Amino acid sequence: MRIILVAMAVFTVQLSFSQSNLQNYTPSILFKKGDWEYKTFQNLYTQTKQFDASGSKVDKGLRETFFTSINQFLYGINGQINVGVDVWIKSSNNSADAFSPSTGLTGIGPKIKIAPFRDVPRLSFQSTFLINTSDDPEGVNGSRYFLEWDANLWLNQFFFDLPLNDKSQLFFQQAFWYRMTKNTSSVDNNFLETQTSVFYSYFPTSRWTIYGMSEYFPRHYDLTNENGEAFFSYFIQSGIGVKYQLVPNLIELETLYTNFWKGSEGEGAGETINLGIRVIRQK
């Protein structure tokens, strides 16, 4: 299964009341006191192939589809501290099993976001703890198709963006996905995944944005032998997106496509399409 957190907001409706510069709406920026943001991301990942030991794509003999809905609310305590809550809902299915689509609430919990240095406002850190409330999400009991790891998730993200000039900017993310498995999980131990992402954005006009992204996502755990091992498996995805400010200062549309073009043995060689809505309220 593939989850895209930063890259996931791709068909975006953004309501803004005091800010029009698209360069200022990156995950690095915190909201001032009383300002808030609501985002809902809809991510569809589908695959019919996976990577073999040589890195080639081989047919799986079926189509697997995973849908993720990430809903986030963030509120500004002040310019250096924001707090919020996330709700993640997932669904999965494949063309071979007789099961109906498997759906569950796989994550709900609080988050905090801080800008640790006043002199570096474009550097921030966000920590989210998500409780998985879904029953048998791995399908261990044979009642459903795999939905999500049977674990709670502690997600820590570092954000930084760098304006290059009036027409372009770079955005970086380094994230740590620490999964705390439950007694009912098929995995014996907690394990870590890391996510390194980079985005390049170009602004041809004040209303248009064109951007490209790439992401490297390794798992530091051997699921077969049940022991930690750095960079045991990985995948790389890249994509291109376009944003358009449909109504200046009010509505922004965005679309993004990504492809999983490289990975270790057993990793999916699929693609994603993502939809979302973002609402920003500033005093």
Image (spheres, rainbow, N blue to C red):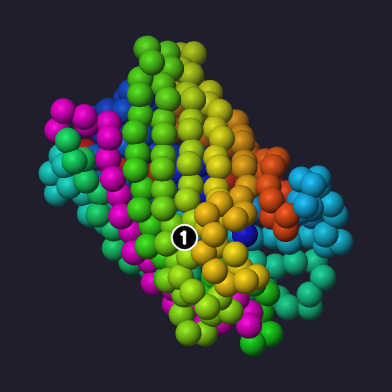
Q: Which residues lie in the magenta part?
A: 118-140
Q: Residue furthest bottom?
A: 141
Residue ID at (85%, 54%): 59
Q: Is residue 136 magenta?
A: yes
* Vertical placement of residue 99 versus 106, above or below: below
Q: Name the residue under label 1.
A: 192
Q: Is residue 180 magenta?
A: no
- The reply, left or right, for residue 190 in relation to residue 72 is right
Instruction: Residue 63: name its quadrant.
Output: bottom right
Q: Can residue 136 be seen in this view?
A: yes
Neighbourhood count class around disc 1 (C-alpha, 10 Å): few under 14, some 14–19, many 20 upward? many
Residue ID at (47%, 60%): 192
User: Where's residue 44, x and y in %?
Assistant: 62, 53
Image quadrant containing the N terminus:
bottom right
User: Where's residue 158, x and y in %?
Assistant: 34, 43
**Label 1 secondary element:** strand
